[in-house]
Image (cartoon, coloured by chain):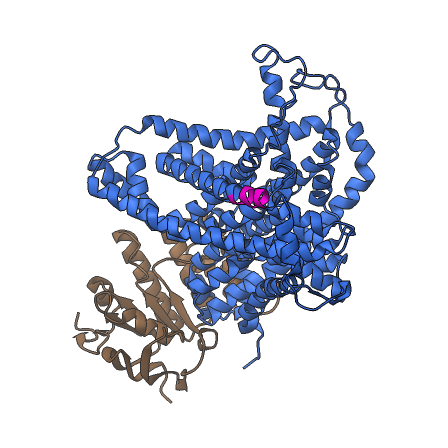
Amino acid sequence: MAKGLQLDHLRITLNGRLLVNLHETVAPGEVLSVMGPSGSGKSTLLSVMIGKPDEGFDVKGRVTLDGDDLTGLGPQARRIGLLFQDDLLFPHLTVGENLAFALPAAVKGRAVRQARIDAALEAADLGGFAGRDPATLSGGQRARVALMRCLLSAPRALLLDEPFSRLDADLRRQMREFVLARVRAEGIPAILVTHDLEDALAAGGMVISPLGEIRQTEGSA
Amino acid sequence: MRLSWLPLAPLLTITILLLPVGAGLAGVLAPAFGWFPALGGTSLSLAPWRALFAWPGLSGAVWLSIATGLGATLVSLAITVMICAAWQGTRAFGLIERALAPLLSVPHAAAAFGLAFLIAPSGWISRALSPWATGWDQPPDLLITQDPNGLALMAGLVVKEVPFLLLMTLAALGQVPARRSVLLTQTMGYGRMAGWVLTVFPRLYPQIRLPVYAVLAYSCSVIDVALILGPTRPSTLAVQVLEWLSDPDLSLRFQAAAGALLQLALVMGLLLLWRAGEYAAARLGCTCVQMGHRMAQDSIMRAFSMVLALVAALAVGLGILGLAVWSVAGFWSFPNLLPDQFTWRNWARQSGGLSRIAIETAVIGVASVLISLALTIACLEAEYRHRLRQTNRVLWLLYLPLIVPQATFLIGLQTLAIGSGLTGMQGAVIAAHVVFVLPYVFLSLSDPWRAWDARQGLVAASLGAGQGRILWQVRLPMLLRPVLVAAAVGFAVSVGQYLPTLLIGMGRVTTLTTEAVALSSGGDRRLIGVYALSQTMMPLVVFALALALPALLFRNRRGVLDRG
């Protein structure tokens, strides 16, 4: 069976209007950018991918991950990591606790879990931040914690919903490189949803509209 | 898939609210038409009504109830609107907002006692003015607190209903672009107050309509405040009904049931009248807009409305202070402002009984709050997980126990409870309290619960957390403050309940409220001070805890409290 994330003839309509029409495979470590203006079906695609489709949408086709059909599974069972433009760190938990929340319970032993969390923080250049209140971190630091939290839950794929749009230009480039490097290092397929051409091109993969029109093929940028 | 009881929560909650109201109405309807087998009433007749209409005080009592209901509601709404129109969006308004929670948590009975202690002939106001302004060297023989026109009663209601309506208005203001609307009218030359009343109020009123109806129904049928501040002979209809109900002559229960139904009819009639008044007010507003008067000179009105707000707040605040001073007063001669001696004797003498009653009050309050909170969270969580929508009809159901007069359906409920041997049991009193605590807990918690960023739940789910874990580890901790505030509101409501405790407890379950109100006829101010102050402190302490606990727990988590 094919590795990676496959959108298998995925067609989403609302009241007869076609919003999403995609048939693509995203290989591990690759990023597919879905680009379009707001209202073009990007968020609909996201909600279908994570298993929480809004009411009234008609979904045809299926999403498979490493060959497993995800149809009918809720967000808990899909193991697709999510990054929004807001970091959405849990404000009542410390940075370390936020990461612990994500770390699967199968990782047992206090010391082992702590070591994983510390390693994740190190990887994000945030060594020693475990005890910090997320509210005291800068925007870029929070975004990095959010990414590490996502990766610690051992996702099999990643959905990036305009994750850089709240950051200013410098930070944006750094964060983008950091995320893309992690995606490649972890070897998981990712879909980036954005309205920003620069973000989409920088992802390095194919750029496509929700209706499947190709904007830019891989590597031609 | 695991079977869950959660989708049933809304139905269960509605049943818990409606069953007592419905059963209570049935339980009062039967005896009102002569059916009460336990008392020998086994045939339907109009005799209870004939007896009711034969009572010479009836028209006086009915008019008094109508005047109190309409008067207190009109004045409370007018003050609320004036304060908002004149001051919304200013710093002074922020101060008013902050004073709301403590004012709201003061039980009606305690506020009424406090007011009585202020305005009575030997009260603080008369003492402050004597003898230099009044010439009195002993308390004058004037009927101020229980005046026959019910003005003191109305005042007692107004000082408590204004904070309630203000809070409801504040909640509704979030959904109206009030400041921009007022600014727009100001650029056209309108006065601030006129602009607010003409453009903000019409959009706001539909959202505070139900609270206003609750105030109208409550003011028309209130018992504890009327016992303390209301006139006697005749008293209001609701008080008279209670008097018949507690008469040793059991045959008066038929007449009481008929009176309770008449009370319901009065409230319905007033609500219809009010509805008609809403149309009239709307027409008047449209006429005003047509004429285009700017009414720009409103500085005097603005100052006046601030004075009204201050007077209302001071009446409660100074009243409570008065209760506190009386509770530690020894000999206190007129017209001295402070007692000649201070003593703890009043408290020491009561300590045994007081602590027992305080514990009973707390147990009933905590139990009814926990039940209400569990039901509320279950309903809201069911709504979130199963994507249910709250309709306007559901809101009406929530308000039903607050709009159908207590004096009507609780009497019927008592009749049923006596029949099934449930009266006098703490559990039955708790169940009765839930009927009134639940709506407030729900109204208080539903907005912050729904305003929670659902993406937090989505992120947690994508990290592998199940629904239960999201609820307990993410949502509830993040919403700790609104949950505790809702609990404190519910606790204050429970502590303040008089009639449910009295009627379902049958004198065997006593709370600080029933005890304090029972003392009112005795007129021992020191004793009243002790009980009414205890009654006030209990919800206040709980409110303080509800605010302090999250601040303490999350002192190093700035992000939690910024949002809540």
Quarter where residue B150 is shown = top right
Q: Which residues are magenta?
A: B59-66
Quick one: which chain is brown? A
Quarter where residue B303 is shown = top left
Quick one: which chain is blue? B
The relative height of residue A73 versus residue B555 in the rendered view (above or below) is below
Q: Nearer the viewer, residue B260 or B478?
A: B260
Q: Extreme bottom residue here? A: A1
Decide if residue A53 is in sight here.
Answer: yes
Decide if residue A106 is in sight here.
Answer: no
For the point 73% across and 41% down, the residue is B518
Lateral position of residue B240 relative to residue B18, left or right: right
For the point 76% across and 65% down, the residue is B40
Characterize the magenta stretch by its predominant secondary structure.
helix
Q: Find residue B310 and report its horizontal and vertical position in percent.
A: 48, 29
Residue B61 on the magenta segment = yes
